[in-house]
Image: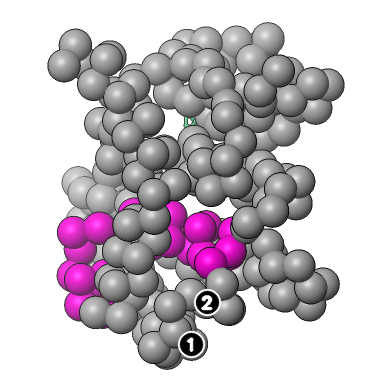
Amino acid sequence: MPPVITAFAQSPDRGRGLARDMPVRWALEEVGQPYEVELVSFAEMKQPVYRTLQPFGQIPTYREGELALFESGAIVLYIAQGHAGLLPNDADGRARAVMWMFAALSTIEPPIMDRSMALILERQEIWHEQRLRLLEDRIRTRLADLSARLGDAEWLDGAFSAGDLMMIQVLRRLAGSELLEGDRNLLAYVARGEARPAFQRAFAAQLAVFNDSAGN
Ligand code: GTB
């Protein structure tokens, strides 16, 4: 039986590949592992039966035999550890790829998520502009450091790895913003990730869900 992941039946991102089933789909495509998708509504995600899989009532989850996982980063790591293609063979290289996954999720993503939330939830507040400037300055600093570290390399540490996958997915949340557009190096890095055939297949699969749900 192929693994089964859960994803939004109706994704609020309208198929832009920003929901967190995207990195899981991308990882599965990179390693050539077929998978099935169970689509869940917001109401279903909050039911006790779903919360046995995901205590916070969120997507994605991953089931394979007796194993049930949640947290997109943990799922991508599990997939990467079980297949060739997303982690280097040598122990030091593997540890560094995992380090980059953590850097994506715990150093780069937090201010980016805070900005997304501020744009959605805090526009009416009198302090919105001030907070947005502060968050964007924080993001700029992080991106400049990341860009300097990447330099003119293709990927963060040798061959493409799960670290790049998570980092590129996090950076994609800034698509269309001058924060990313203003850094040609990182913009090209994201474009290289998005050009990978595995990314394209994953993106097409989640977009098809949106198109079906919208009757397109
Ligand atoms: N840390 C968890 C993980 O990485 O798996 C976070 C999971 C999570 O945030 N899931 C979101 C969810 O299920 C969907 S991806 N939310 C429903 C809820 O909490 O009730 C986050 C997301 C949502 C929407 C957009 N968007 O519209 O662009 C992008 C990303």
Q: Is residue 165 visible?
A: yes
Q: Quadrant of the C terminus?
A: top left
Q: Quadrant of the N terminus?
A: top right
Name the element at disc 1: helix
Tell whether label 1 touches label 2 (CB within 8 Å): yes
Nearer-N-terminus badge (2/1): 1
Q: Residues within 10 Å of mark 2 (few under 14, many from 20)?
A: many
The secondary structure making up most of the magenta span is helix
Identify residue type, mark 1. Answer: Arg
Magenta-colored span: 160-183
Residue on which the image places disc 2: 156
Say if the magenta span includes residue 145.
no
Residue on which the image places disc 1: 149
Residue at 80% over, 27% down: 67
Name the element at disc 2: loop
Residue at 51% over, 41% down: 29
Residue at 36% over, 71% down: 189
Q: Is residue 14 left or right of residue 142?
A: left
Estimate the spatial distance between the alpha carbons at disc 2 and disc 1, rounded to whole Å: 8 Å
**In the rendering, at what x and y percent does residue 195 appear?**
32, 57
Q: Determine the image quadrant of residue 41.
A: top left
Relative to residue 135, is residue 2 depicted above or below?
above
